[in-house]
Image (cartoon, rainbow, N blue to C red):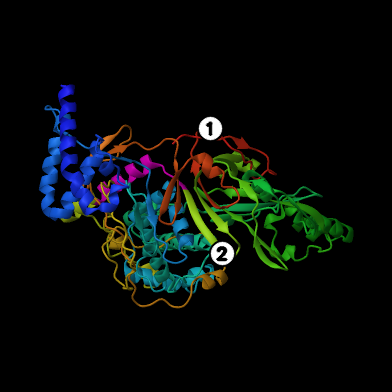
Amino acid sequence: MPGDDNSILTTTTTHLQAIFTPLLARLFPSLTTSFPIVRRTNSNTLVYTVAAATACLIYIFGPAALRLITSVTSFIFSPFITSSSTMRWPRAKKREGKHTVGLVNRANDCFANSNLQALGALPSLYTYLVELLDVPRPPPEAYRLLVSRTLTDATETASRRSAGANMTEPVEITGALRRMVAALNEPVLEHKELDPWDFLHSVERFYNSLISRAQHDAHELLLLVLETLETEQLRLTRYYSALRAQTKDKEEQEKLDKVIASIPKFPFKGSTRDQITCSRCGYVPTTAPSPFAVLSLMVPQRARATLPDLLVDFAAPEYIQDYGCARCRVGALIQRSQVSGDEALVAALKPYSEDPSHLPEELEARLPRDVTSAIAKSTQFHRLPQVLAIHLSRSIYGGFGASRNSCKVSVPERLELYEDYTAEEDKLRAMMGAQRRVEYELAAMIRHKGTHYAGHYECFRRKNLTWWRSHLESQQDRGQDAATRRENGSMEDLKNKNKTDDSGDINELDRLPYPQQRSAQVSPAVVTAKTHTHDATPSAPSSSQPATPLSAEASDSGRSPVSSSSSSSSWLFSFLGGPSPASGQSPSPSPPLSSSASLPSDGAVTITGEDGEYEVLPASPQHGWWQVSDDKVWERSVREVLREESGAYLLFYERVESNNNSSSSSNGNCSSNGVGKRRKR
């Protein structure tokens, strides 16, 4: 009865006050004027009474008072506990997608942390890393021989020729980056952080140099990583191409053709081409494409700009005077030869009067140099990459030094560009110069705050939880299946001995043996019920890697590709210092966590972890992005991300496949840019 409950509470409160009020006043005289329970003995406040009684009991009896407190508490609250159920505290609630794995910043590491977080937001890059690691690997002795040949290859850049000379693993940086990306996308419900030097130490070993702890440019590190990744892919391709060239057996040739076809294309590799149009004769010579991995755009020195405007400026024609047009020079030489009566020279030049692109050198040397004309030179996209990385160059150089351009650049979520058709896709359109529309969607952004010489980098990255959860689970299943096959002895390797020609006139590279099959990959745990904080104490260097989520796969260690083929080694050696130690150990990140539960796609579920039961709520649809500043993580909406205009520095767009690609026949417009409808994710 309610009346009985109230009488019990009143009686209990009166007895407790009568017992403990004098005792409390004797022990703590100063409280008689400040604590309301002492001077207002007619109060029926149960909370104050129980608190005062508990304090007195603990003061007098110490730990022995716990039993008495438990008994009194159960007596007081027994009227409120129903007979049909017991009192249960509400479960803790955690939300999927609120947290992600951060990276420790020990000393000026934000330039690396932001790059790794941005690369970790690219599903296309992760797919490429997994596919490249699935390619059988050359034996160590074959790889060393291949690298030694690269050292004398004049077609390679200086930094690429010397890179990896001390390595025996052909895809070490690729494997290291794959493990880092998988670890960064591990679904977590609480704070967790990793050490970026687990990956950076692999880059140091590849270049046999040390990365200084001073502040660095995130753009330079991105170029370094991409060039290293592409180097590994190119060397793997060259190895199998050389092996295929010296193989005589058709069956072995077919196997090698399949291996070469399985090597994925580097997702950051694109190319541009210059279009030169003569204003006098209208001749458009064929130009060789220029590859790029990161597209650099100059930010104008004004208050505001948009990314489409910068791309239009990038493709805008440039007018050049006194250019020697080959077609005009051939026509002038034909006219002069006709006047002089040199019919043999006229007959030799006639076939090249319309298209002098294949003019022989002996005829080209006789062309007049005094014939010039004005031309319009513009830039077009020849091949657009799967991942378009854009560098917004904000440096301003002058007589007073260098400063940072704080122009607000509006960045669209969707971007449209145009590229050339290939002859294999559509020969007629390729001959007509038609272009195909390509759509991109923003996947990550690196923001810089500060001056030209100092500042802080942060990364905004798209969550894309469903994609990462499904693909990390599939990779984990693939690793388990491969391990089972290996235990049963059913793992098939390619032949270790290749059939060679008996002539003996085969170079050393042609004798390279077949590679062994790589060991299985094991992805980190996909679901965690409780996370552990990374140990902040750095460990001493060592050559062996501990069994951590980033280094558990010894066979996966590899290199990361950097794709600027025109990059010089000047900034590389300023970025990388002296020789690296013979042995080095990177700090180990927190161990992977296991759980039989899976994160919810919709609706809440209950998960039992080490700290008890808690309820997991679905991800917030309004916050599809994370803002990651080293080990700190905030949820952001796409509107908040696109408002970061003055600090936008590096942009990462992923290609969106669409079935209704339109084409443009306009040669002069290298890129048309715009914002399309946003796609929900």
In magenta segment, residue 462: yes
Which residue occupies 47% across, 57% down? 115
Residue 138 placement (x, y as % from top left): 34, 64
Q: Which mark is residue 660?
A: 1
Badge 2 element: loop
Say what amino acid the circle numbered 1 marks. Answer: Asn
Residue 142 placement (x, y as % from top left): 35, 69
For the C terminus, the image quarter is top left
Which residue occupies 70% across, 44% down? 668
Say what amino acid the circle numbered 2 marks. Answer: Ala
Foreground of the two, 502 or 332: 332
In the rendered structure, which disc, 2 or 1, sits on the residue that comes first in sequence? 2
Q: Is residue 289 visible?
A: no
Q: CA distance from mark 2 to mark 1?
A: 46 Å
Foreground of the two, 161 or 62: 62
Residue 42 is left or right of residue 628, and the answer is left
Q: What range of the chain is rendered magenta?
A: 461-479
Label the magenta part by its dominant secondary structure: helix
Which residue occupies 55% across, 43% down? 642
Which residue in the protein does label 2 denote?
454
